[in-house]
Amino acid sequence: MLVAKEKILELIPQRNPMVMIDCLVSCDETQVVSQLSIRNDTLFVNRGGLTAAGMIEMMAQTAAARTGYLLKKQPETANKKVPFGVIGSIKNFRLYFQPLIGSVVTTTVNIAHEVLQATVVKGKVEADGKLAGEGDLQIFLTGDQPEQP
């Protein structure tokens, strides 16, 4: 594990209860992998399973964790706030099944294109080695995260 649950909030702009990743498994310039243990109180759980919206948000937050990790890794940007991003588009999303409460899901995001403030990613969510969902996201960085209350 690259970044444990106790440190994950340093890499993403989201805050509880919206946090949809527990840890960062691996990260480099082109690929990032995260994990989440699905609990009763996890957002985007319906009828005992993680919804498509939850999987899409996991992909987006995994991409955000990559941005945060790469930012914090460089001495010249280590003290900068992690930028806030928004999902601009979702394409080719497929839901194969809803992972159940108690499952540990792994999200893998591959960077397809990155130009200025826009990133196109291909993401997949797996539970027990089985593909639960996959799709393409276009994410736009909007600047620093909003101040926390």
Image (cartoon, rainbow, N blue to C red):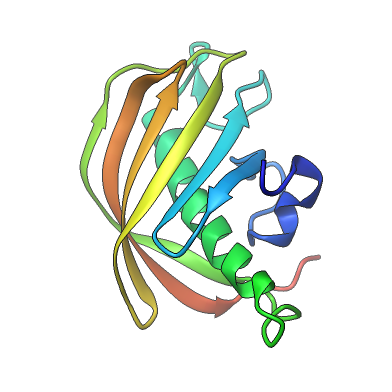
Q: Is residue 145 visible?
A: no
Q: Where 125 falls versus 19 (above or below)?
A: above
Q: Which of the 4 image quarters holds residue 124?
A: top left
Looking at the image, residue 122 lies above or below residue 134: below
Residue drawn at 74 percent across, 60 percent down: 10
How many marks overall? Answer: 0
Is residue 99 or residue 35 the one in the foreground?
Answer: 35
Q: Nearer the viewer, residue 57 or 71?
A: 71
- Against 29, residue 60 (above or below) is above
Q: Position of residue 40 (x, y in %)?
A: 66, 18
User: Residue 9: x, y in percent?
Assistant: 73, 54
Q: Is residue 144 left or right of residue 6?
A: left
Going 57% across and 35% down the picture, which residue do you hit? 35
Where is residue 135? Give x, y as percent: 27, 42
User: In which quadrant will I find the C terminus?
Assistant: bottom right
Q: Would you place residue 78 above or below residue 18 in this image?
A: below
Which is more toward the observer, 136 or 40? 136
On the image, the x and y values in percent for residue 69 come to: 62, 63
Does residue 13 appear anywhere in the picture? yes
Q: Which residue is at a point 34% across and 67% down the rendered structure image? A: 119
Name the residue rendered at 56%, 47% in the picture.
26
- The quarter of the rendered structure image containing the N terminus is top right
Furthest residue toward bottom? 76
Residue 106 falls left or right of residue 11: left
